[in-house]
Amino acid sequence: MSRATLEKDPDDVTRMFDEAAARYDRTNSLLSAGRDRAWRARARTVLGLRPGERCLDVACGTGVSTTELARSGATVIGVDRSPGMVARGADRPVDLHVADALALPFADDSFDAVTIMFGLRNVVDPVAALTEMARVTRPAGRLVVCEFSHPTWAPFRAVYLRYLMRGLPWIARKVSSNPDAYTYLSDTIRAWHDQQSLATAIREAGWSQVAWRDLSGGIVALHRALAPAGSAEE
């Protein structure tokens, strides 16, 4: 597992996602055996959006997650650093923009809720991105981070890691428009925080009442929190 690393050049990552955009959503559904749809739906439920609220979807890709969130009746804006991804989602019934998670083009307290699904792992400074998301969220506003994590049952975790190392890149070579992107994604998933470590990073960014729930045995974790002025620390 020596290749796994969280060090990255943001421009290289952006180019990689630009090249993967054409088949990105289809490839993700195939690699997750369709579970990606259920994970996004659960994130929407946990975020608890209501009609009339404003939500920011950071690292939105082609806007699949943004569209899912908009089913709540809230006004949802998606941003992503990859112009290729945003262009691919241009026909979706949501508002998508090219923007960096580390410098969001919105005023303080602009949103009732903010989320990032499967994108925090690809940001060069995750704590800085979480801090920036807190800036644009109103006091007591909500955060949901939906991200790959660490399966909690050791035998399952061993099988999962073998899939990431061998199965995922092999399948991606057959179906993706940029197979190298999935070798990178496999490596970063293995190097990423476990559930407790990510909760600590979210607290370091100023969020309070941080908690999480595991999905699919811990393959994915949903972390939720409140904006800094929302309530006292746990």
Image: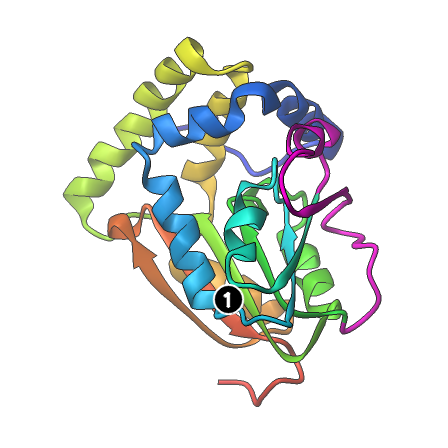
Residue 100 within the segment the image draws in magenta: yes
The percent coordinates of residue 207 (x first, y second) are 59, 73
Is 112 rendered above or below residue 11?
below
Q: Is residue 39 above or below residue 234?
A: above
Q: Would you place residue 65 above or below residue 112 in this image?
A: above
> Residue type at mark 1?
Thr
Q: Percent x, y for residue 104? A: 79, 54
Q: Is any part of residue 76 visible from this angle?
A: yes
Identify the element where label 1 is drawn.
helix
What type of secondary structure mainly makes up the magenta span? loop
* Magenta segment includes 226: no
Residue sitting at x 30%, y 54%: 215
- Spot the residue most to the left: 155
What's the magenta region?
80-109
Q: Residue at x 32, y 45 (%)?
A: 219
Q: Which residue is mark 1?
A: 200
Spot occupied by residue 183 in the image (x, y as percentages of width and height): 47, 22
